[in-house]
Image (cartoon, rainbow, N blue to C red):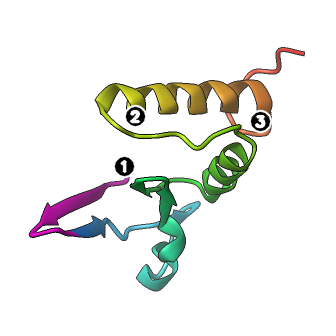
Amino acid sequence: MSIIVAVEKNGCVSFAANSTSFDGIHLKPTDMAVGPFNVRRITNTLLGVTGHSVYFTILDHLLENQESEPRFENRNSVFDFFLNFTDTISKNYHFIEGSTDEA
């Protein structure tokens, strides 16, 4: 399980993330587990990303090919974005384990 949390206080936002990262059964050093690539700015939102590195590339690809950037204005808009994201992964990125080839 991966965790990212953001806390806003006095107009400042701080991110924190767990730093345990495995490559197969091997524990990666902490300095290899986190970095500036873990946070994306999408319009008015900072998005913390965890998980397999291929998802970073898919997220970037998806965002670059959308007609407009998503706006995370409320809980439902965030949920709708990630429903679309997971649907897009299963339909268009067949190299991801668990996705199905519908062609």
| 83 in magenta | no
| Span colored in magenta | 1-12
Q: Residue at x 40, y 29 (%)?
A: 77
Residue 41 point in image, percent of width and height: 48, 61
Q: Residue at x 70, y 37 (%)?
A: 67
Instruction: Calculate the distance from the C-alpha at mark 3 to the C-alpha at mark 1.
Output: 23 Å
Residue 34 point in image, percent of width and height: 45, 74
Question: Which residue, given by chain and number where applicable, does mark 2 sit on?
Answer: 78
Of the two numbered discs 3 and 1 on the same chain, state the one appearing first in sequence.
Answer: 1
Residue 36 point in image, percent of width and height: 49, 76
Q: Residue at x 65, y 47 (%)?
A: 63
Number of residues whose C-alpha sits closer than 10 Å to that of mark 2, classed few (under 14), some (14–19) or many (20 or more): few
When the figure is inspected, residue 72 is found, relative to residue 45, above or below; the finding is above
Image position of 101 (left or right of 48): right
SS state under label 3: loop
Q: Amino acid at mark 3?
A: Tyr
Of the two numbered discs 3 and 2 on the same chain, state the one appearing first in sequence.
Answer: 2
Q: Amino acid at mark 1?
A: Met
On residue 1, which mark appears? 1
Instruction: Calculate the distance from the C-alpha at mark 2 to the C-alpha at mark 1.
Output: 20 Å
Answer whether residue 98 is visible to the viewer in this image. Answer: no
When the figure is inspected, residue 44 is found, relative to residue 23, above or below; the finding is above
Closest to the observer, 30 or 59: 59
Question: Which residue, given by chain and number where applicable, does mark 3 sit on?
Answer: 93
Number of residues whose C-alpha sits closer than 10 Å to that of mark 1, classed few (under 14), some (14–19) or many (20 or more): few
Q: Amino acid at mark 2?
A: Val
Furthest residue toward right? 103
Q: Residue at x 25, y 59 (%)?
A: 6
Answer whether residue 59 is visible to the viewer in this image. Answer: yes
